Image (spheres, rainbow, N blue to C red):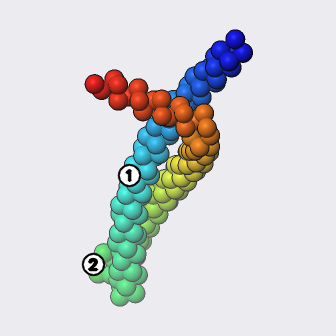
Amino acid sequence: MEKLLKDHNESKEIQKLMEDISLLLAQKQQLEEDLRLEKEQSAKLQQQQTLHMADITKQLYENSQLILQLRKDLRGGKVNGKNFSGNSELEKELRLAKEDAAKANAALTTEKRNKLELMEALKESYEKEERVLRSYSKLLSRYESLKSSKLGKLTLSYWKVMKRLRRR
């Protein structure tokens, strides 16, 4: 009778361990999928950021070239490649050039803000990925410790046999 009770208790323990291992395996698969998705998102975000930075750099270069040309023209008595005899026309062109420069500066500021937002999103993505990795390693260590226990080995063996039997 004692032996039957002992066998019955061991059977319950084995079933509990089997349930724990099944749950851990499901969690492991979910975490692996989450990790894969996070890596894909991170790569896309990084690619977008690189393209965006190239565009910003190009615009900044073009604006600086335009400013240099305007300065050169102003020194030579020209505005936008035109000679002016009257001050009113020159002042008007200078005002328009300043307005253009202000617009370009505002656009550059907007682009910098966008870059900053992208960097923050990338940082959040990296932090989330780190949390997933830590969770995955914790889960993996729990799985390994369960797998290396006597009842865990017995449970894994049981499920291997059951899997083979179901395939037939």
The image position of residue 63, as x and y in percent, is: 38, 71
Q: Earlier in the sequence, mark 1 or mark 2?
A: 1
The image position of residue 59, as x and y in percent, is: 36, 67
Foreground: 3 or 67? 3
Foreground: 14 or 100? 14
* Residue closest to the far right: 2
Q: Can residue 34 be seen from the camera position used here?
A: no
Q: Is mark 1 on a helix, strand or loop?
A: helix
Q: In this view, does 56 lie above or below 43?
A: below
Drawn side of residue 163 relative to residue 81, left or right: right
Q: What residue type is labelled 2?
A: Lys
Residue matched to label 1: 44
Q: Distance between the residues labelled 1 and 2?
A: 47 Å
Drawn side of residue 23 relative to residue 13, left or right: left
Q: What element carries label 2?
A: strand
* The C terminus sits in image quarter: top left
Would you call the spot at circle 2 few (<14 residues within 10 Å), some (14-19), or many (20 or more)? few
Q: Which amino acid does label 1 sit on?
A: Lys
In this view, the mark in front (1 or 2): 1
Would you call the spot at circle 1 few (<14 residues within 10 Å), some (14-19), or many (20 or more)? few
Foreground: 20 or 130? 20
The image position of residue 98, as x and y in percent, is: 44, 67
Residue matched to label 2: 82
